[in-house]
Amino acid sequence: GQQLNQSPQSMFIQEGEDVSMNCTSSSIFNTWLWYKQDPGEGPVLLIALYKAGELTSNGRLTAQFGITRKDSFLNISASIPSDVGIYFCAGRGETSGSRLTFGEGTQLTVNP
Amino acid sequence: DTGVSQDPRHKITKRGQNVTFRCDPISEHNRLYWYRQTLGQGPEFLTYFQNEAQLEKSRLLSDRFSAERPKGSFSTLEIQRTEQGDSAMYLCASSLKGWWGNTEAFFGQGTRLTVV
């Protein structure tokens, strides 16, 4: 089945620093999504990408759909304490239908 | 409408008991999904409905699991004869599929199941 490898697993940064995380797939995806999950809550959609090469921003967040359609990255600029949480990539492949495949998550800790 | 609502938020049950969870999607959404998330992992797809029809089930959904969406609105997920390995967060999500395209899925807060 489809698998997503997300890295890094965890990051410890100082407030104000930029952050980058990425996701790679064993197969081609036609949709890449990035979610954030706070403890005890469900994932919240941050950015959706639908075309290879697409670069999309949402405030301090920027994500790109890789040209090979097998990878995506998420950047967070000028991190703030409320950026703390787990960030998940998720994707849909050509034969996935409506199901999403999620990565294992990147735990982000921001020190004030 | 305040989003996808799940009930209960937490459930502790003894091994071998049956449990049922409820999900109320965003009111105009015609698609409803169930995912399971274990500690330290991303959510894993279980099943989804379009209106009342269950269109896809994962191999993760064993015979002990059953999901229904009888009137195309709320959904229930039942686990029979619970096992300790069923301990997880069960997430519900909903989306809208229209003639113009689809929205992405909005997730509820989840039901945390602990089997003791």
Image (cartoon, helix red, strand yellow):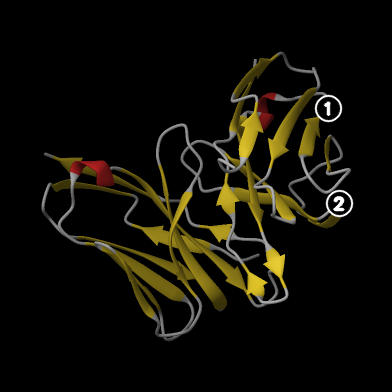
Residue at point 46%, 50% (across, down): A44
Residue at point 48%, 64% (across, down): A33
- Can you identify the residue that label 1 sits on? B80
Secondary element under disc 1, as helix, strand or loop, is loop
Q: Pointer 1: residues within 10 angstroms few (<14), some, or many (20+)?
A: some
Residue closest to the far front: B1
- Identify the mark at residue A78; answer none if there is no mark: none
Secondary element under disc 2, as helix, strand or loop, is loop
Q: From the viewer's perspective, is B89 left or right of A81?
A: right
Q: Chain of mark 1?
A: B
Q: Is B96 above or below relative to A42?
A: below
Between the residue at mark 2 and the residue at mark 1, the CA separation in whole angstroms equals: 22 Å
- Quadrant for the N terminus of chain A in the image: bottom right
Q: Position of residue A14 (x, y in %)?
A: 11, 46
Confirm whether residue B46 shows in the render. yes
Could you tell me the amino acid type at mark 2?
A: Glu
Residue at point 81%, 21% (across, down): B18
Of residues A81 and B63, the one drawn nearer to the viewer in this rendering: A81
Q: Chain of mark 2?
A: B
Q: Is A12 above or below relative to B12?
A: below
Q: From the viewer's perspective, is B31 left or right of A57?
A: right
Confirm whether residue A27 shows in the render. no
Q: Position of residue A7 (x, y in %)?
A: 35, 59
- Can you identify the residue that label 2 sits on? B52
Q: Position of residue A103 (x, y in %)?
A: 48, 56
Q: Is A5 above or below relative to A29?
A: above
Q: Position of residue B105 (x, y in %)?
A: 59, 56
